[in-house]
Amino acid sequence: MTSLRHLFLLGRPLGPLYGLAMRLRAALYSADVFTRQSMPVAVISVGNLVLGGSGKTPMVRYLAEFLLAMGLRPAIVSRGYGGTMRERAAVVSDGRSLFLSPQQGGDEPSMLARALPQVPVIIGRRRVHPCRLAIDRLNANVLILDDGFQHLAVRRNLDLVLFDGSTLAGDGRVFPAGILREPISALCRADAVVLTGITASNREGAEDFAALVRRRYPALPVFSVSLARPSLRLEGDASPQSGPFFAFCGIANPDRFSDTLRSMGLIPSGTLNLPDHVRYSPELLAEICARATACGATWLLTTAKDAVKLHDLPCSLPLGIIEITLASTPQFDLFLGQRLQDILGTAH
């Protein structure tokens, strides 16, 4: 974190220039100087303004399940960040079978494909190509763009912008001077703001931020949602463990994993934080097991994002996985249902 603050300090003179460039880019798309592709089905974007995590993956999963419950055929379209595939469009899952490994398709797409076996997941650097594949070959009648707010080349019917309840908008500076991907004024493109991961400790700050957004954008709905109580499952035939455990993860914000464990009353005997999107190997997993054994742990605990990359690797210790899902509110569900009815009634 200290090195990141140093980076932001060094980048402070460039932040306004980058912010200006992002405003100009958005204006050129809005004026149709840059081409925007329309899809023949409804498109929902889940994105954020902040570098790092904001609860997008749980929200994408929640939306997919919401759409399935409405009798629709959703497909998830992702960039496939961290994966090795370079095709214009590649199918991680067709809603029946998995075709790509996490190394090929990326961590989050693979995790979503396993969590949503009925929902196709397609990746591609330019979203227009996987969007068309999902419609033409996989018969999707609604698309969910994962991390799509800055991807303006595909027109969307609903833009949800997420902020983590703890980090919010940081100090309001644009990268490389701060954590914002583009200026906060980009919220003028949003259809709703959703504050995620609301807890007792961050609720007051989140409410102040929500009030600020409402004052600046009176017509923009702002919702607050929390994460459902995390659940622990054990991989394979492992039995529930009560002995000491070793926690490890490779995610953008490892402190969030630590906070989750504390909220569950779980105290590890040792921890290891790895780089985001780390590629696991038998050697790395063996090293993790050795570290765990050295500190007296009898089992391992990690995130669902990490676990999806460990399925085919030999592991000498039982593996526990923390599952995170979204706990919505009646207000957000009502908004979502009404907007979807409007969208689906006008989608062509």
Image (tube, rainbow, N blue to C red):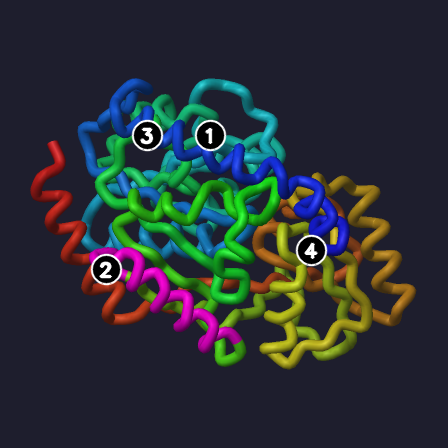
324 above or below 50? Answer: below
Q: Could you give the CA–CA distance between mark 4 and mark 2, rounded to whole angstroms?
A: 40 Å
State which tag comes first along the sequence, 2 or 1: 1
Magenta segment: does it hold 217? yes
Q: Could you give the CA–CA distance between mark 2 and mark 1, rounded to whole angstroms?
A: 26 Å
User: x and y percent of residue 113 in the render?
Assistant: 45, 43
Q: Specify the farthest residue to the left.
A: 345
The residue beneath circle 1 is 21
Q: Magenta span: helix, strand or loop, mainly?
A: helix
Q: Could you give the CA–CA distance between mark 1 and mark 4, rounded to whole angstroms?
A: 35 Å
Q: Is residue 162 left or right of residue 13?
A: left
User: x and y percent of residue 12 in the render?
Assistant: 63, 43
Name the kind of residue labelled 4 in the image: Cys
- Which residue occupies the foreground of this view, 89 or 8? 8
Which of the numbered marks, if any, corresponds to residue 218?
2
State which tag comes first along the sequence, 4 or 2: 2
Based on the displayed image, in which of its 4 quarters is residue 62 positioned? bottom left
Image: magenta residue range: 202-221
Q: Could you give the CA–CA distance between mark 4 and mark 3, rounded to whole angstroms?
A: 39 Å
Image marks 4 and 3: residues in contact by CB distance under 8 Å: no
Q: Specify the farthest residue to the right.
A: 294
State which tag comes first along the sequence, 2 or 3: 3
Magenta segment: does it hold 103? no
Residue drawn at x 85%, y 50% as measured from the top left: 287
Q: Would residue 96 be seen by someone viewing this image from the given angle?
A: no
Image marks 1 and 4: residues in contact by CB distance under 8 Å: no
The residue beneath circle 4 is 249
